[in-house]
Image (spheres, rainbow, N blue to C red):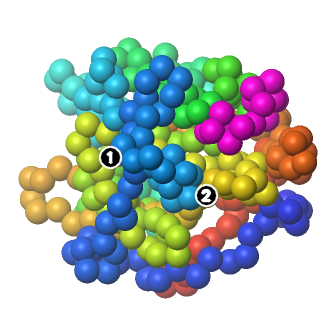
Amino acid sequence: MTAHHSSTTRPPVDLPRMPSEQELSADCPPIPLQRCRLSGEELLFDCPDGFDRALAQGFFLIEVPDGTDPAPGDRFASHFHEDRAGDALDGYRGYRDIEVPGPYQGYFDREHDQWENFYVEKTNWGLLPAEVATLGEQMTGMGIAVLRAVFRHLAIPPGLWSRISNGLTDNGGHQMLAFNHFRSAKPARGAKFHRDSGWVTVLRSVEPGLLALVEGRLGAIDPRPGHFIVNFGSSLEVLTERLPRPVRANVHGVVSTRRAPGRPDRFSYVTFLDSALDGSVYRFEDGEPRRVQSVADFATQEVERTYDDTSAL
């Protein structure tokens, strides 16, 4: 067991029972999310206080830029888990058995969830269809622009950005694509409650089902056509927690889904943007970033956290 650093551990989170898909509208009404678009290096929010509201909520919507086509990612997320069938979609199939070099990559079958995943770091995006890799580059560029905009909004000196983010603000760090398929025939929750441990996550989802604990309330994080969903990771929360405008990294999960025969299963995919495991987690205070923990230990600590009762699984 990794020794936990007292300054980054958090008290247990008491969450209500995760509702079913049918109970969503009654038990977890949608959380109104701030909307923005990326213009050069700036995030332009629809509301004057939209940026600050997004930091406090931990989630917001960002317009899909011109020239970015999510369709290849949608196809891959819908088919990566399937066996090849000898047709035009075979380039998107057969990824359960592909060996991906490096730790925590490749196919994962979540025993207690409908969730199954394919994870692949940027160095291995050559294993993907070219148009999917291109989409990954575009989503990653958006996420890095979001992080830089957050640092600028919080008046963190630009000369410190690369050090704090382990080079992510300069297109380094750790960049990963994760594709999610939710097996509706499996009687289990969709995906467990968790927090992302890194900096910024850019999510493509096309239907409701994502839940998050925002400002003390469990609510639905619903997609909007023409937008990605962005959420912040716990490295950003630790960095900013003693600033006048701290950033929230909230607990979230996915409800169990059911499908009528012939209706496609739920899917989603994300770019996770993080520091490399040999980097450090910092807290900004007194005008300086102070190292509080290694990224490797912090990531292990976050994975070990549990947010819901698994005794009934």
Residue 143 belongs to magenta span: no
Q: Main secondary structure of the magenta part?
A: helix
Q: Position of residue 234 (x, y in %)?
A: 67, 53
> Vertically, is 282 above or below 11?
above
What residue did someone put label 2 on?
248
Residue 290 lies in quadrant: top right
Residue 289 lies in quadrant: top right
Q: CA distance from mark 1 to mark 2?
A: 21 Å
Q: Position of residue 208 (x, y in %)?
A: 28, 59
Q: Which residues are magenta?
A: 150-164
Say whether residue 114 is visible: no
Say whether residue 34 is visible: yes
What residue did someone put label 1 on?
205
For the point 61% across and 50% down, the residue is: 233
Q: Quadrant of the N terminus?
A: bottom right
Badge 1, how many Cα within 10 Å: few under 14, some, many 20+?
many
Horizontally, residue 56 falls left or right of residue 259, namely right
Horizontally, residue 42 falls left or right of residue 31, namely right
For the point 72% across and 37% down, the residue is: 155
For the point 79% across and 57% down, the residue is: 242
Residue 9 lies in quadrant: bottom right
> Vertically, is 73 above or below 21?
above
